[in-house]
């Protein structure tokens, strides 16, 4: 079996924190390949305005240059309608075959909401989940979310839970990276530098395409 990581999100835009998660997952779980999968139409963010898909894919490809086990997939941009994870996972299974062993990387906040996802029980059967431990999320831990929302799972080892008929849940422990996509967007709109938040190629792309332009100051302002 070949261990394959799947890391979904809006990546609007991609930043150093996303890459740090990918590197930690590679180190701790030993993936042969980790796919970054930008959502085309996130079903849980129907009202949120997001950057066009092609821009987000282009920035991701710039960000992963020099990382041979990181691959950017545009699979969700090839479908119409909401970008449901179960549909993406089934397509990866068709593309990569029965020898692929899937691990879906997810933040603790999204994992706590997993029971609202389309066919979530099937997801638990078809892929393991790698949960980014974020203690700041309501002060809850991965262990608490598993106990509260996923009955039948038993702890098998430190940071690993299993349940008969389902794949495992893993807690991904890593040093927090103080950056977010919203912070980047806010800084750009305020005309502040973002060089420390995202790879240089992404910073240049954002500035060249003016994706989050700073508001022009009115005459007379200092």
Image (tube, rainbow, N blue to C red):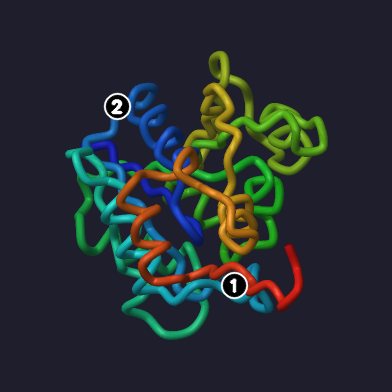
Query: Which quarter of the figure is the N terminus placed in?
Result: top left
As drawn, is 151 to the left or to the right of 32?
Answer: right
Q: Which mark is residue 30?
A: 2
Q: Is residue 173 above or below residue 213?
A: above
The residue nearer to you, when weighing 139 against 48, is 48
- In percent of width and height, residue 110 lies at 64, 50
The residue nearer to you, when weighing 180 against 188, is 188
As drawn, is 79 to the left or to the right of 85?
Answer: left
Residue 209's image quarter? Answer: bottom left
Residue occupying the point 74% across, 43% down:
149
Query: Which quarter of the figure is the C terminus placed in?
Result: bottom right
Counting labels gives: 2
- In percent of width and height, residue 127 lies at 43, 46
Is tag 1's residue or tag 2's residue first in the polypeptide sequence? 2
Rate crowding at label 2 as few (under 14), some (14 to 19) or many (20 or more) other CA atoms within 10 Å: some
Q: Which residue is mark 1?
A: 43
- In percent of width and height, residue 114 lies at 64, 53
Residue occupying the point 56% across, 35% down:
132
- In percent of width and height, residue 92 lies at 29, 60
Element on which disc 2 rests? loop
Q: Is residue 78 above or below residue 15?
A: below
Which residue is farthest top?
A: 158
As drawn, is 119 to the left or to the right of 92?
Answer: right
The residue nearer to you, when weighing 151 against 195, is 195
Element on which disc 1 rests? loop
Residue occupying the point 64% across, 68% down:
44
Q: Which mark is residue 34?
A: none
Residue occupying the point 64% across, 70% down:
45
Rate crowding at label 1 as few (under 14), some (14 to 19) or many (20 or more) other CA atoms within 10 Å: some
């Amino acid at each position: 079996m070949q261990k394959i990581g799947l890391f979904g999100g809006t990546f609007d835009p991609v930043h150093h924190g996303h890459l740090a998660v990918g590197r930690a997952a590679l180190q701790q779980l030993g993936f042969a390949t980790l796919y970054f999968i930008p959502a085309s139409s996130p079903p849980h963010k129907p009202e949120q305005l997001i950057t066009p898909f092609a821009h987000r894919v282009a920035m991701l490809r710039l960000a992963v240059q020099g990382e041979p086990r990181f691959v950017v997939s545009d699979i969700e941009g090839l479908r119409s309608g909401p970008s449901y994870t179960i549909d993406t996972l089934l397509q990866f299974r068709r593309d990569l075959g029965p020898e692929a062993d899937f691990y879906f990387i997810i933040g603790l906040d999204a994992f706590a909401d997993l029971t609202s996802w389309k066919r979530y029980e099937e997801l638990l059967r078809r892929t393991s989940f790698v949960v980014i431990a974020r203690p700041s999320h309501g002060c809850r831990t991965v262990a608490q979310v598993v106990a509260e929302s996923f009955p039948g799972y038993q702890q098998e080892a430190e940071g690993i839970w299993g349940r008969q008929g389902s794949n495992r849940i893993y807690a991904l422990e890593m040093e927090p990276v103080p950056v977010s996509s919203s912070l980047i967007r806010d800084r750009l709109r305020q005309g502040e530098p973002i060089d420390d938040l995202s790879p240089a190629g992404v910073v240049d792309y954002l500035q060249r395409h003016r994706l989050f332009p700073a508001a022009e100051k009115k005459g007379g302002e200092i």
